[in-house]
Image: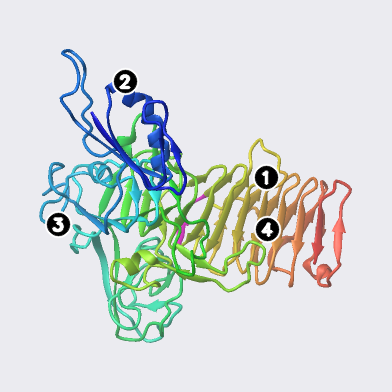
Amino acid sequence: MLVRVLNTSSSALTLGSSLGTLDPGASLVRDLTVAQLEQVETTLNKLKLKGFVEWQVTPDTHGEEGQTEFHPAQALATKTQGPLTLWVNAHTGADRNAGTRSQPLASLVEAEKRIPDIVAHPVTIHVGPHRGNGYQPPEFRQRVYHYSIDVVADSGGTLGNGCNLLLSGVAQSGSSHVAVISEAGLGVDTYRGKTIEMLEGPSANWRRTIQYHTDENIVPALLWEGGGIAQGQAFRVIEPAVRLDMAQLVPQKTWRITAGESVYSAIYGFEGRYLEYPGVNLVNFVIAGGSFNINAGHHVRLFGCELNADAPSGALFQGPITAGVDQIFGATTDNPTQPYVEYSNISRRLGGGRQDWVGWGLNAQRKVFIDHSSYMYFYGLVAPQLHIYGAGTNVHFRGGNIFEKGVTVRNGAIFEANAKVYLPDLTCHITHLTGDAITVRDFGSQVRLTATSLRAENGSGVYLGEGAQALFHVEVGVTADVGIELKHGAKAHLREVTPNFTTTTADIHIGPVPTAVPASSLTTVGDYVLEADGSAVYRV
């Protein structure tokens, strides 16, 4: 077999005994037996993932009778030569097709195979209506990412754009950048977690996850910018129509999106240009089928998706996953009050603007688990319940996140300062009707709240277990039997202003007995209460 190797690095490469050493910029062509090729294949594949080498194998008549010939379907290391667009439609496509609009592929699995190893240009996969229970989710193999892969469901459904229409309406008097006032008759939270899309005015084509609504007042996950909403502007409520069938992941029930190695190392850009962290972006899908695990080896972003884990155990997230945003400036954990600038480069690449899809997040029908070593941003996450576990887990919430049955923060068997949750937004609402709104269970786990609304019936606003910590910044509202419950060395830090407590039993319970502490006794910086078991609350 003829093998061509090109060294694209700035130094010599040692390729092994079969190919020797290759100088920078040099190339060679060698006729190798199958055995020789297998000897160097591992080395070449490692190098290609770093972008240092391009190589291809051409089938040949080489070999003796009875010898198995090696016939690769394509070059083993390939690189995009320009922007790549693929089309998928399960009804009109075939996997032998070219993948164009007129000759679409039939599966996402085949579309993933058509993407080269080195993503040097933007890649877009347009996805049409599915068959049966949905498309089989593709496992994205290891790649070098200079740009992202956008997977967008944008055809099919009752609207023909990948969406089903649920409601059409016109904004009434009183509509603003905060909310859309509709005609009466919506009911209460009938469409919570669905998508509201403006059709007219400065915010035309903008989509937002619905945080909640009354009978006539629709509140989006993130504010409408660009002048807000005026009376008479048309809008509609929609939902995704194209389905990914997670049941086809049997037996492991794990969707591995191993996006590979990014050539950029900072979310703030590269060489003066505004660039995102490259990764895999999923837009406007229903992700459903049993209980399942989404494992992101690199950056994965979800826009306008519905997560419907049919089984009561829900869905598990692992890795860096973001919903409703893909670029954030000014977001630091040390200064959560620093102004944020959020962008959606995906909507821009598809002909819109950078604010069009910010806050078009994720609607989870069942509880969500976030496992160890995950770093996540959520703008518009609606879920019944959220559980956060494990070492190195950092989760940031902004923009209309709602959890009906509370949030549990626990770093399991690893007793270190690892599991952290940040709730820095007035639109974060956490409600539990039968227990504590936020439970921080273990030593080293931490929750930080800024302008967050907590409500707990028959429980505490924040329950802090052994060694856990909570930091309260400005404008935190707590409505509960007990505002804060502290046990066995737990610490609560009240910064800037004391939280606004509305409690039936006590603002703060501290210690094993426990001792009731009114918030009015902690209004001056330096005030504190310390119990014998080490639990303490401070005004700092």
The CA distance from mark 2 to mark 1 is 56 Å
Find out whether the residues at labels 1 and 4 contact each other: C-beta distance under 8 Å: no
- State left or right for residue 74 relative to residue 346: left
Q: Earlier in the sequence, mark 3 or mark 1?
A: 3
Q: Position of residue 425 (x, y in %)?
A: 57, 68
Residue to which mark 3 is pinned: 101
Label 3, residues with CA under 10 Å away: few <14, some 14-19, many ≥20: some
Front one among 63 and 101: 63
Q: Amino acid at mark 3?
A: Arg
Indicate the secondary structure of the residue bearing disc 2.
helix
Circles 3 and 2 in contact, beta carbons < 8 Å:
no
Quickly name the residue at label 2: 35
User: What's the magenta region?
Assistant: 380-385
Left/right of residue 198 with respect to residue 99 in the rendered view: right
Q: Nearer the viewer, mark 2 or mark 1?
A: 2
Q: Which of the labelled discs sits on residue 481, or is there none? A: 4
Along the horizontal axis of the image, is 36 left or right of 319? left
